């Protein structure tokens, strides 16, 4: 593992502000174009939305400026931009259903509410959480929280079954997908667990064919998570979430141990699980069939579990072509669930290949920043957490975009920030907030001379001397309690333990 | 309408381009430090954060620093050569265990190898029952010994010393 630090630290807040203005222009511009394209005038609540989004975005910017001044400058603008684009598309689909069917689902308004909630939640996380290493103390609490959240939909009376999958929890008029929050809890748990146990996972065991095989008893946790994800698949009939948890664990194991063997073991277990599921569960079988024989008229016209949605989405994207039809000019509303599962196909139709490649690059940059934060931060827990959270975003994009474009079988995950869904939006904003917090920690210049000149060199030459870094340099909190009043002396040992080796 | 449609796509890519421009600074002016010993040293370009190092480090940590007090613990030999720990008021634990203050990646050191703690005006070196021993020069340390700045202490493959 390596650490990368900027030579001259710039806080990047000015670039963040500039990018934020651009991102807001993107979202608001899309909203305006939807109105112009579909009704010939600006949408009725255009100014409300503009000011709302701007207030929320700038509010978050100032919270970051105040509480995490060295945080990464591109995370907030990208999240705001994607969120604005998603909002515009959902509004556009609302208008379509208003014009064609006469009823207004009002999804855009609700999504705007969830956006506000998400950005406020992100602000609160950045504000309250002064140091991500405090999360490490809640490693096993996070595991329990995660498991409870996953199992919550199975509780009778509380859980709701929608479209065959039992992943919703009804709370009055709202329904939440607790699995979206469970992924954050699991990322915290895996990071905390692996940072303490990675040595046994890395070093113990025999080498077979150049692969370092772990000992059987060290396989325990991965087996447990595998069983848990299979249980989610069987009991809640949710392929996507089960894939998400398993992928997260394998990825974090790989980040922690740098052993290819874990990826191989993970993929083998996954293949075994997938084959077993495909042969024994009808709904998984249906997904595979719809994927492989999508253009069969029989499969296309199947009433349940057919490929109608998938193929219509692909026709939509084909209609968009290279440059897209333009906002409000296509017919993305022909696809069922165009606002959530298939929002990528809807955007593909209206923005074209040019537009969705830009969207994919935005996701790519978001994930790259997450990985970059993982490289830049000094403690092992932060590295694993940032890497895991970035992987979650990447994995969700791959599964959704791959499913919509028929690269892999379709599974029900949400596209971060774009797709309609309150839980998903809230959870992803919290992920951005955690990444902001970790990146602030990674890029902040230390007030102490932790990395001194090498031994035996006279202090006078230290200005141009090399600066070796080491994990064992103490975090500043240990030495200067005045720097961060939130850290009590009791945390000192915890922080030292958190330091990566 | 076509103009607006294409203009929007241009705007989308302008955003992407400006994001990438901001990220460009990652490529230049960074310092990469490998954790695996060896190639850990890469000079910081130009004006790295050299400034905070010139002041007396002890001034911030010790309440009443005197000129003769050691202010830091330096690893002068071994895989972690060049590592510096500022001395504060708490003890420094050296060993292989991740809970140590100075974690040595060294097969010849014990998990909790030795301890350096302040006592009054001086720092005391204490061997914590290590397998291969802690040495000052050729002499094995068996009892807690006061440590004077500049004296080299051998722990496994590493040599540490106190510096002012």
Image: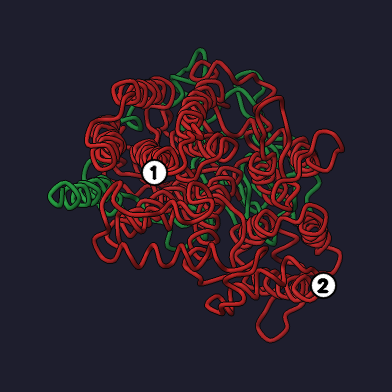
Chain colours: A red, B green
Image: A381 above or below A175: below
Q: Is residue A170 left or right of A336 when viewed as pictured?
A: right
In front: A145, or A194? A145
Residue at image point 53% right, 33% down:
A475
Q: Crowding near pointer 2: few (<14 within 10 Å), some, many (20+)? A: few
- A284, above or below A102, in the image: below
Identify which residue is drawn at 58% across, 18% down. A486
User: Mark 2 sits on what residue?
Assistant: A280
Q: Position of residue A25 (x, y in %)?
A: 25, 35
Q: Residue at x 16, y 46 (%)?
A: B4
Check the picture and name the quadrant holding the C terminus of chain B. top left
Q: Is residue B51 above or below residue B31?
A: above
Viewer-proximal residue among B94 and A121 = A121
Residue A339, position as x, y percentages in the image: 48, 46
In front: label 2 or label 1: 1
Residue A143 coordinates in the image, percent (x, y)? 76, 42
Q: Which quarter of the picture shows residue A446?
A: top left
Residue A401 in the figure: left or right of residue B92: left
Outermost residue toward the bottom in this view = A209
Badge 1 crowding class, 10 Å Cα cut-off, few under 14, some 14 to 19, many 20 or more, is many
Instruction: Residue A89: give its label.
Output: 1
Find the distance from the CA under tag 2 to the CA under tag 1: 38 Å
User: What is the quadrant of residue B141 in the picture?
Assistant: top right
Q: Is residue B132 visible?
A: yes
A179 or A47, which lies in front?
A47
Q: Chain of mark 1?
A: A
Q: Name the one closer to the observer, A277 or A380.
A: A277
């Amino acid at each position: 593992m390596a650490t990368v630090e900027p030579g001259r630290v710039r806080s990047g807040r000015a670039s963040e502000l500039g990018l934020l203005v651009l991102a807001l222009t993107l979202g608001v511009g899309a909203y305006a174009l939807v109105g112009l394209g579909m009704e010939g005038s600006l949408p009725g609540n255009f100014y409300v939305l503009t000011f709302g989004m701007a207030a929320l975005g700038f509010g978050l910017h100032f919270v970051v400026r105040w509480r995490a001044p060295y945080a990464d400058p591109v995370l907030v603008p990208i999240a705001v931009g994607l969120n604005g684009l998603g909002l515009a598309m959902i509004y556009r689909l609302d208008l379509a259903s208003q014009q064609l069917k006469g009823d207004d689902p009002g999804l855009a308004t609700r999504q705007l509410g969830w956006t506000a909630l998400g950005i406020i939640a992100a602000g609160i996380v950045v504000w309250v959480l002064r140091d991500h290493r405090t999360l490490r103390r809640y490693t096993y609490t996070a595991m329990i929280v995660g498991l409870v959240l996953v199992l919550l939909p199975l509780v009778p009376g509380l859980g709701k079954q929608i479209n065959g999958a039992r992943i919703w929890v009804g709370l009055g008029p709202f329904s939440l997908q607790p699995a979206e929050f469970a992924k954050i809890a699991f990322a915290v748990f895996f990071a905390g667990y692996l940072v303490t146990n990675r040595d046994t996972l890395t070093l113990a065991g025999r080498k077979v064919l150049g692969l370092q095989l772990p000992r059987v008893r060290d396989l325990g946790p991965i087996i447990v998570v595998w069983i848990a994800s299979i249980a989610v698949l069987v009991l809640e009939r949710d392929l996507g979430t089960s894939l998400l948890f398993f992928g997260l664990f394998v990825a974090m194991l790989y980040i922690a141990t740098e052993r290819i063997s874990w990826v191989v073991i993970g993929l083998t277990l996954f293949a075994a699980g997938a084959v077993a599921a495909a042969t024994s569960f009808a709904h998984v079988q249906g997904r595979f069939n719809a994927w492989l024989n999508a253009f069969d008229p029989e499969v296309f016209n199947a009433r349940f579990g057919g490929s109608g949605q998938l193929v219509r989405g692909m026709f939509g994207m084909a209609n968009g072509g290279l440059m897209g039809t333009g906002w409000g000019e296509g017919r993305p509303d022909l696809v069922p669930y165009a606002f959530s599962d298939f929002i990528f196909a809807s955007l593909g139709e209206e923005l074209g290949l040019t537009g969705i490649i830009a969207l994919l690059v935005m996701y790519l940059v978001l994930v790259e920043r997450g990985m970059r934060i993982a490289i830049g931060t000094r403690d092992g827990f932060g590295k694993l957490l940032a890497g895991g959270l970035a992987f979650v975003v990447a994995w969700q994009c791959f599964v959704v975009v791959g499913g919509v474009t028929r690269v892999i079988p379709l599974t029900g995950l949400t596209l971060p920030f774009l797709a309609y869904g309150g839980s998903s939006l809230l959870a992803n904003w919290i992920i951005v907030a955690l990444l902001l917090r970790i990146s602030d920690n990674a890029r902040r210049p230390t007030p102490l001379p932790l990395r001194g000149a090498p031994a035996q060199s006279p202090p006078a030459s230290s200005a141009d001397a090399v600066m070796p870094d080491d994990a064992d340099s103490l975090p500043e909190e240990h030495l200067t309690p005045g720097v961060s009043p939130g850290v009590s002396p009791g945390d000192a040992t915890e922080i030292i333990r958190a330091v990566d080796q | 309408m076509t103009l607006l449609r294409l203009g929007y796509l241009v705007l989308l890519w302008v955003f992407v381009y400006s994001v990438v421009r901001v990220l460009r600074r990652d490529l230049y002016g960074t310092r990469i430090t490998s954790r695996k010993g060896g190639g850990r040293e890469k000079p910081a370009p130009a004006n790295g954060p050299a400034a905070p190092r010139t002041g007396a480090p002890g001034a911030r940590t010790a309440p009443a620093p005197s000129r003769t007090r050691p202010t830091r613990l330096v690893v002068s030999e071994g895989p972690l050569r060049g590592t510096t720990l500022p001395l504060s008021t708490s003890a420094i634990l050296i060993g292989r265990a991740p809970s140590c203050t100075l974690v040595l990646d060294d097969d010849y050191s014990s998990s909790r190898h030795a301890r350096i703690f302040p006592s009054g005006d001086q720092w005391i070196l204490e061997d914590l029952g290590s397998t291969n021993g802690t040495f000052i020069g050729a002499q094995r340390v068996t009892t807690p010994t006061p440590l004077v700045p500049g004296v080299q202490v051998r722990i496994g493959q590493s040599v540490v010393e106190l510096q002012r």
